[in-house]
Image (spheres, helix red, strand yellow):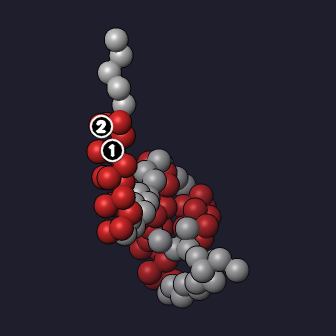
Amino acid sequence: MDNKESKIAFVSNEELEERIQLVMRQTDYTQDVAREKLTACNYDAIKCIKLYMGITEKKAPAQVSLNQQIYRQLRNQLGAVALPEPP
């Protein structure tokens, strides 16, 4: 089971109405559509608005170990030296 799917959100009715109003102000959604989209986004208004605007989340760059960095530099340097120049 995905970790994102297992999260459960508890939102009071007043807070839900505030979030619906926020989404409606920032988008052209009706109240029913805003409620559906908020439910799909686990009641996260910011995520719902970003989805509407087409903003995707940036993924963190892959962690590269120090050894990988060193060997990458060695390969680049040796590769540049080993290639003969064309006549």
Residue under the point 59% across and 85% down = 8
Q: Nearer the viewer, residue 10 or 73?
A: 73
Q: With respect to residue 11, does 37 lie above or below? A: above
The answer to whether the residue labelled 1 contacts the one labelled 2, judged by CB atoms less than 8 Å apart, is yes
Image coordinates for residue 46, horizontal then vertical, percent: 41, 65
Residue placed under numbered mark 2 in the picture: 81
Residue projecting furthest to the top: 87
Q: Is residue 8 visible?
A: yes
Q: Nearer the viewer, residue 77 or 60?
A: 77
Q: With respect to residue 20, does 16 lie above or below? A: below
Residue under the point 60% across and 80% down = 3
Amino acid on which the number 2 mark rests in the picture: Val
Residue under the point 60% across and 70% down = 39
Residue placed under numbered mark 1 in the picture: 78
Amino acid on which the number 1 mark rests in the picture: Leu
Image coordinates for residue 2, horizontal then vertical, percent: 65, 77
Residue under the point 49% across and 77% down = 16
Q: Nearer the viewer, residue 25 or 52?
A: 52
Question: Which quadrant is the C terminus positioned in?
Answer: top left
Image coordinates for residue 7, horizontal then vertical, percent: 58, 84
Image coordinates for residue 54, horizontal then vertical, percent: 47, 47
Q: With respect to residue 22, does 7 lie above or below? A: below
Callout 1: helix, strand or loop?
A: helix
Q: Nearer the viewer, residue 4 or 49?
A: 4
Mark 1–mark 2 distance (CA, rounded to whole Å): 5 Å
Q: Quadrant of residue 84?
A: top left
As drawn, is 16 to the left or to the right of 25?
right
Local crowd size for mark 2, using a 10 Å CA cut-off: few (<14), some (14–19), many (≥20): few
Q: Is residue 35 visible?
A: no
Question: Which quadrant is the N terminus positioned in?
Answer: bottom right
